[in-house]
Image (tube, rainbow, N blue to C red):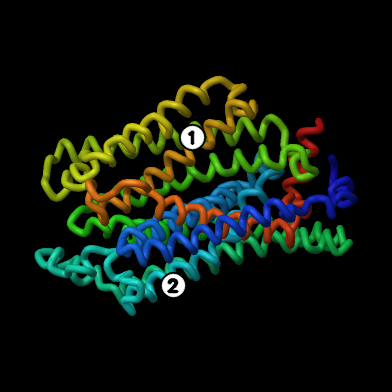
Amino acid sequence: MNSQSLYDQRQQFFFPPSATARGGLLFCMLAGVVTFIGGLYSGEAARTWGSYLFNLFFFFGIGLGGIVFAGMQDVISAKWGRPIIRLHESFASFLPVALGFFAVMFLCILLKLGRANELYPWIKDPSVIQHFESKQIWLRPGFMAARDLFAIALIVLVSSWQLRQKLRPDLAMLSGDPAQAEKLGAASTAKLRYWTAPVLVIYALTFSLLAFDLTMSLSPTWYSTLWGGWSFAVMMQSLTASLLLFMYLVRGTPIGQLTKRQQFHDVGKMMHGFTVFFAYLTYAHILTIWYGNMPEETQFFFVRLEQPWLSLLYVVFFLVFLVPLFTLLPKASKWTSGLAIPICCSILVAQWFVALLVVIPSIVEAGKWTMPWIEIGAFLGFLGVFLSCVFRFGRRYPMVAIGDPLLAEALADAHH
C-alpha cells in the first residue's frame, strides 16, 4: 500500500464502537459507580478509595505508556511501528480524564468527603511519621495534592502537544489536501525528533514523582529508590500486552490490514523483554532489602507474606513471569493468536494483582480481606471509562497515521 492508497481509504480508518460495545461500556461504568457507592456505605471507605486509586493508576500507566512508547519511536524516527503507532497513541486519550479523577480524589481527601482522608495512613494518623522530620515536610496533604495534580496536568499538556503534532497531517489528509498533509508531516517529524527527548525526560520525572507519592507513601515508613524504575517496568509490560491485544482486535479491519507479522513479532519481543526487566527489578528489590535486613525496609514485604496476599504473590510470579518468559520464546507465539492472546491476558491479570498488592495490604488487614468485590467493581468502572476514551478517539481521528511520512516509507520498504 502506498500514499495514494492511504489517501483513497482514509475514511475507513476510524474505529467507532458498535452498539454492543457501547452497551458493555455503559454496564462497566455503572458497575463501577454502584460498587463505589456500595463500598462507602458498607463501612470500608479506605478500601474503597484504595481500589479507586490503584485501578485509576493502573489505567493511567497504560495511557501514559502509550504516548511514551510513541515518543521512544519518534525520537529516533523508527519506522517498524508506524502501522500500529496510532493504536497505542489512542491510549493517551484517557490522560485528561484521569486528571479529573485524580482531582476528585484529592478534593475528597482535603475536604474529608466520603472518609477519603483514611486512604493514606499518615493523613489518618500523623504520628506515624513523627520521627521522620523530612517526611513530615514532604507528606502534607495540601502539598502532595498540589504537586501531584501539577505533575499530571503537565503530563496531559505535553502529551496533548505531542498528539496534536501527530494528528495535524492526518486531519489535512482527511480534508482532501495531500500536499498540505505532506508538508505538515515533514515538519512534525522534524519537530518531534528534536523535542521528544526532553519530553521523555518530563514523563520520567513526573511519573516517578507520582509513583513515590501515590503508591509508595501508603507505607510511609518504607522507601525504595528503585520504585520509579520498577513502576515504569510495570507500566511498559502492561502497555505492550494491551497493545498486542488491540492489534489482534483490529486484525480483520481496514486498520489492521497494514499490520504484518513483523509488527506482531516486534511487539511480542518488547513484551518478552519487559517481562524480564520487570522480573529483574523485582528481584533487585527483594535481594537488596534481604541483604540489608533493616526493619524499616523488610516490613513492607512481611505484611504481604501473610494470607491471602501470599497466595496472590504465587499467582503473580506464575502469570507475570514464568508463563510469558517461556511461552514467548518461540517466534510463532508472538503472531499466533491462540498463544499470544492468553499470554497478554495473563500479564494484564497478574499486573492488576500487582497493583492490588501494592495498595490494599497497606490499608486492609489481611484477615479482614475476603471477596474482592470492591476491587473488581472499581476495575470494571475504570475499564469502561478507559475504553470509552479510546473509542471516542477512534471515532474522531483515524487509527492509522495516514499523514505520517514515516508510515509511507515503512510501507514502501515492506513492499520492496
Residue under label 1? 346
Evaluate if marks 2 and 1 touch, with contact meaning CB atoms under 8 Å apart.
Answer: no
Give the mark, 2 or 1, whose residue is nearer the N terminus.
2
Mark 1: secondary structure: helix
Image quadrant in which you'd find residue 103: bottom left
In terms of depth relative to the viewer, which is nearer, 201 or 125?
125
* Residue 104 - label: 2
Q: Residues within 10 Å of mark 1 (few under 14, many from 20)?
A: many
Q: Residue at x 31, y 61 (%)?
A: 44
Q: Quadrant of the C terminus?
A: top right
Query: On screen, 390 above or below 84?
Result: below
Q: Quadrant of the N terminus?
A: top right
What kind of residue is marked 2? Val
Rendering coords of residue 157 (x, y %):
54, 69
Rendering coords of residue 291 (x, y %):
15, 36
Q: Residues within 10 Å of mark 2 (few under 14, many from 20)?
A: few
Rendering coords of residue 128 (x, y %):
14, 64
Mark 2: secondary structure: helix
